[in-house]
Amino acid sequence: MGKSKRKQKTEIFAVKYANGAVVAETDYDRNLLKGLPVGSAVKIIPISNNRNYQHHKKFFALLDCGFEYWQPEFSVLTQAEEWIAQAVAKKIAIAANDENFYQRITKPIADSVLADVRLNRESKLDYEGMKTLESYLDHVMKKAGFYDIKPVQDGGTIKERWSISFANMSQEKFNSVYKGVYGVIWNETLCNIYESESDLDNRIDQLMDKRMESLNYILLVLGFMAVPSLAFIVAIIFQNYITRVVFHWTACVSAIVILLTGKWW
């Protein structure tokens, strides 16, 4: 019996705030969190301070800028399939003892078969569904050269991108990754969108500021919900109509103050 495949661990990075909330701050991490089944156990491990978390968020803001304009190109035929088709065509030509047989007969047949297979597979593909932030991260990392070559069972090799997790990459190495990926994204698409790299940097900063505002709003809503809930519990304990009314209106006023000012008492 063969060994069972080890399940790949999903790493989700988040920040704990003063009110106790633990929030995934990048779209990438939030999408990973949404993908977990309800009731999944999550292991939280505090990370060391050797990595700059703000830089980590900036990296994913850069990814979002490029992802918007990225048009993925997927090959539905593997190199092995193309090689086998042409190798068989050449062997037939050699067996026919005709130097021109491959170019005149067998190569066009092999090309035609490969074209039919390609057309059939492309008709079943959902290209929009295949355009994900995960696939884009994989694309730009590999194009920037941040990958390892791994052997596969059929005798070939694949490119496996480096992990950018806090546990597997130092800040110094991550600086190089950011610079390399930035160059790929700029040269591939964004040089045609922004007038200069400074404009792109400003856009990245805007995205980070916008997400911080969204996060503050989420925390604010959590606070808005928490105050009436606490008041309701207290009212139940006291079991008095007047007390319940007083606590109810106090909770509403408190929640409105929090929503308008963004401040706790």
Image: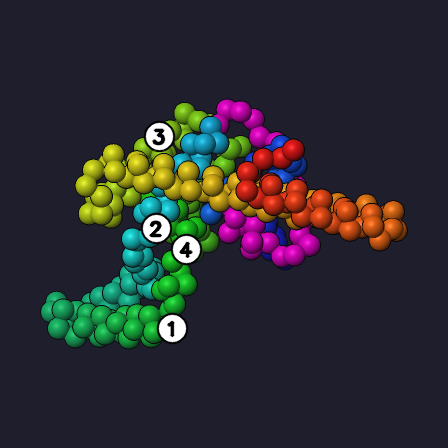
Q: Secondary structure at mark 3?
A: helix
> Is 65 above or below relative to 15?
below
Q: Earlier in the sequence, mark 3 or mark 1?
A: 1
Left or right for 170, reference 248: left
Q: Earlier in the sequence, mark 1 or mark 2?
A: 2
**Quarter of the figure that contains the N terminus:** bottom right
Q: Which mark is residue 67?
A: 2
Residue 221: percent from the left, percent from the top? Answer: 59, 47
Residue linked to disc 4: 132
Write down the region rendered in magenta: 28-51
Q: Are marks 3 and 1 in contact (CB under 8 Å)?
A: no
Residue linked to disc 1: 124
Residue linked to disc 3: 176
Q: Are marks 3 and 4 in contact (CB under 8 Å)?
A: no
Q: Earlier in the sequence, mark 4 or mark 1?
A: 1
The CA distance from mark 1 to mark 2 is 23 Å
> Is 174 above or below relative to 243?
above
Q: Secondary structure at mark 4?
A: loop
Q: Amino acid at mark 1?
A: Lys
